[in-house]
Image (cartoon, grey):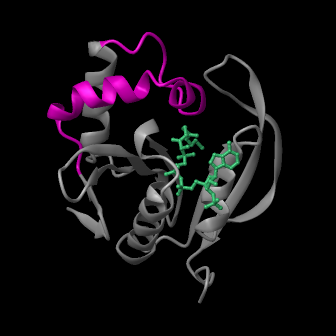
Amino acid sequence: MQLTAPGLVLRPWLEADAPAVQTALSDPDIARWNPQGWPVDEERTLSWLRSRADWSAGDHASLAVADATDGTLLGSVSLHHIHGDEAEIGYWIVPAARGRGVASRAVTLLTRWGFGQLELHRIQLLHATANPASCRVAVRTGYRLEGTLRESFRYGDGRRHDEHLHARLATDPWPGE
Ligand SMILES: CC(C)(COP(=O)(O)OP(=O)(O)OC[C@H]1O[C@@H](n2cnc3c(N)ncnc32)[C@H](O)[C@@H]1OP(=O)(O)O)[C@@H](O)C(=O)NCCC(=O)NCCS
């Protein structure tokens, strides 16, 4: 399966992505806001890749975000905790590709696919309140803020953070529509 948007390809993860993923998971912002455990060594990276490449349990749909022109790995986007017609969405973008709408386009693409192909009704998006860039992605992609969860998740810095809960319903209008 492959999804495309101008300049972007969302495609399944490959073991060949290991070096780029190891670098990405070692980025301080990704390690903080998308914690996968430490150290980010080869074994942990391969385990991360294999779990995301294996969709057989039906509880997640995880894709690599790549540059459509040269195939460079730009990031990660996934629907996870899929149960019934609900799911959560998560993402990270490598530092060199930030600030040019990659996360917003990838989230929009996977959200449309989740509502269309998986027939989801509700997708949640959670981020630490201390992570305003992620909040902007949520708002730009039409995930409405529903509230603040207090000290609801322990992030990579070892601290529990308050989180914003955003969500989209299949029936919500898209931004600008
Ligand atoms: C959050 C993240 C995914 C955004 O990726 P991106 O491709 O740069 O996102 P976009 O370009 O689509 O949008 C970025 C938005 O964040 C804003 N932004 C960036 N840094 C910011 C900051 N420090 N404070 C506030 N807003 C910020 C940008 O201005 C932009 O919003 P705008 O278009 O309304 O101006 C990326 O920064 C990242 O991977 N961070 C580390 C991991 C992470 O936070 N993952 C999400 C966990 S919930």
Judge whether 82 appears above or below 150 on screen: below
Splitting the image into 4 quarters, where does residue 146 fall? bottom right
Identify which residue, 83 or 101, lies in the foreground.
101
Judge whether 33 appears above or below 54 on screen: above
In the rendered image, residue 89 lying in the magenta stretch gets the answer: no
Q: 11 left or right of 58?
A: left
Identify which residue, 3 or 118, lies in the foreground.
3
In the rendered image, residue 34 lying in the magenta stretch gets the answer: yes
Q: 162 left or right of 166?
A: right
Identify which residue, 65 or 165, lies in the foreground.
65
Judge whether 15 appears above or below 3 on screen: above
Residue 87 seen in this snapshot: yes
Give how far across and how far down residue 173 sits, in percent: 61, 84
Q: 127 left or right of 97?
A: right
Give how far across and how far down residue 39 sits, in percent: 43, 10
Identify which residue, 53 or 72, lies in the foreground.
72
Judge whether 101 appears above or below 163 on screen: below
Q: Which residue appears at 22% of the width and 59% of the height?
A: 68
Quadrant placement of the N terminus: bottom left
Please give the range of residues in magenta: 12-41
Residue 54 seen in this snapshot: no
Q: 14 left or right of 167?
A: left
